[in-house]
Amino acid sequence: MQRKVILVLIDGLAWQVARDSLGYLLGLAEAGRASAYSLCAALPSLSRPLYECILTGAAPVDSGIVHNGVRRLSNQSSLFHLARAGGRRTAAAAYHWISELYNRSPYVARRDRHTNDDSLPIQHGMFYHCDDYPDEHLLLDADTLLRLHAPDFLLVHPMNVDDAGHRHGLDSAAYRNAARRFDALLSDYLSDWLAAGYQILVTSDHGMNADGTHGGSLPEEREVPLFVLGDGFSHHPSLTIDQTMLCGSMATLMGLAHDKPYCPELLA
Ligand SMILES: [Zn+2]
């Protein structure tokens, strides 16, 4: 079945804060309209390695994207590549490292910030490069991409939660409030996106520690949320899923040919 998918990748959101703070998503789960799980991020618990893990299914030790300074195109087949091979449309409102992994590296803001090129893996992109780029604007970017291009796969990637965590640490009002703010902002869009026929996943690359960093194996660095919304999911009350299975699971959901690991129990 050729479903359309939106992946909301909240940068740097620890499960322990997600499970307490994302009131709208938790309310949907309580009402049986979403399912909430936690999953264990791959190591090292760093952004660029885990963007690659989520979008290709390859753990950092296999992809070679082992730290944030590895600034080159991915040599894996990403969900964007799989979607294009299947003749489907792709878009992303995301941090510029996503453009560097899958479209062009290095990122050149004047060329790449607004991308519309059918020959690229991410055909339509609105990329940003300031960590305090407002989540509110990012969501508007994503919604604009959706309405202009009706992509089959859309990546939505906000940075303000991670930014607050780096500035103030895990146990801070600023970090928790950034998560609450994003949940409220997202609540304006989710029902419209579901009504437009999308299956939606909301997850995070990694969490945050009390030192205002991440990278290691502490539970608060590795445990991240996975909310799923849509009739393409099983909505089993509990399941075990690895971060390396997200790419293959989304590809299966979209009806794309792939050889990635995936989680059959996640899907309807
Ligand atoms: Zn970070």
Image (tube, grey):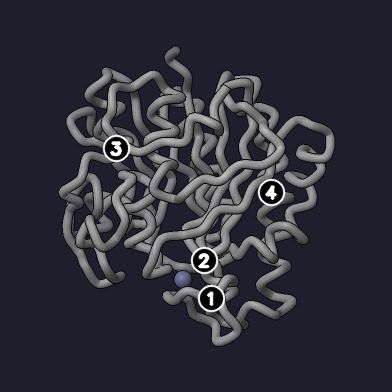
Indicate the secondary structure of the residue bearing disc 1: loop
Residues at circles 4 and 2 in contact by the CB criterion of under 8 Å? no
Mark closer to the chain start, 3 or 1: 3
Earlier in the chain: of badge 4 and badge 2, it is 4
Give SS at disc 4. helix
Specify the label residue 185 is tagged with.
Answer: 4
Q: Are marks 2 and 1 in contact (CB under 8 Å)?
A: yes
- Circle number at residue 222: 2
Q: Are marks 4 and 1 in contact (CB under 8 Å)?
A: no
Which quarter of the figure is the C terminus placed in? top right
Q: Is residue 56 above or below residue 166?
A: above
Of 119 and 253, nearer the camera is: 253
Q: Residue at x 50, y 50 (%)?
A: 9
- Identify the image quadrant of the N terminus: top left
User: Are the residues flagged by discs 3 and 4 in contact, CB closer than 8 Å?
Assistant: no
Query: Label 1 is placed on what type of residue?
Result: Leu
